[in-house]
Amino acid sequence: MKTTLDINDQLLADAKALAAQQRTTLTRLIEEGLMLRLRAQAAGKARAKLRLPVFKGRGGLMQGIDPLSNKALLDALGDDA
């Protein structure tokens, strides 16, 4: 599809130089740039929807364990630490 774009003169010159250096067309260079931006946006939306699982069970510490004491917590873990 053909379309008309207004592009900054220096940006266009830089893009043409890069296309020539990479032995590709300006059209292909622009298409690749658009694809990269669209993929990045889609990936950002996918990341924003990520939700961490939350444990909603009951429980807590066993009686007699001081939650403010690292030593008491480590002792309660025993060999699992």
Image: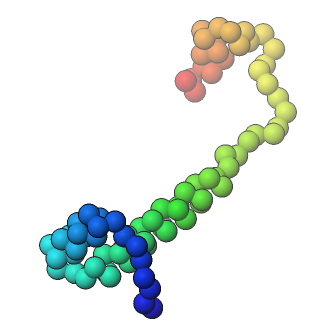
Q: Where 81 falls versus 53 (above or below)?
A: above
From the top left corner, tell me how far across and down residue 38 is, in percent: 49, 68
Q: Is residue 22 visible?
A: no
How many dots with numbers? 0
Q: Residue furthest right?
A: 58
From the top left corner, tell me how far across and down residue 50 is, in percent: 64, 52
**30 on left or right of 48:** left
- Kindly identify the residue that appears in the image at 23 percent across and 69 percent down: 13
Q: Where 23 falls versus 71 (above or below)?
A: below
Residue 9 placement: quadrant: bottom left
Q: Is residue 9 visible?
A: yes
- In the foreground, 47 or 36: 36
**81 on left or right of 49:** left
Residue 26 placement: quadrant: bottom left
Q: Where 76 falls versus 23 (above or below)?
A: above
Which quadrant would the N terminus be assigned to in this image? bottom left
Q: Residue furthest left?
A: 21
- In the foreground, 56 or 3: 3
**54 on left or right of 10:** right
From the top left corner, tell me how far across and down residue 55 is, in percent: 76, 40
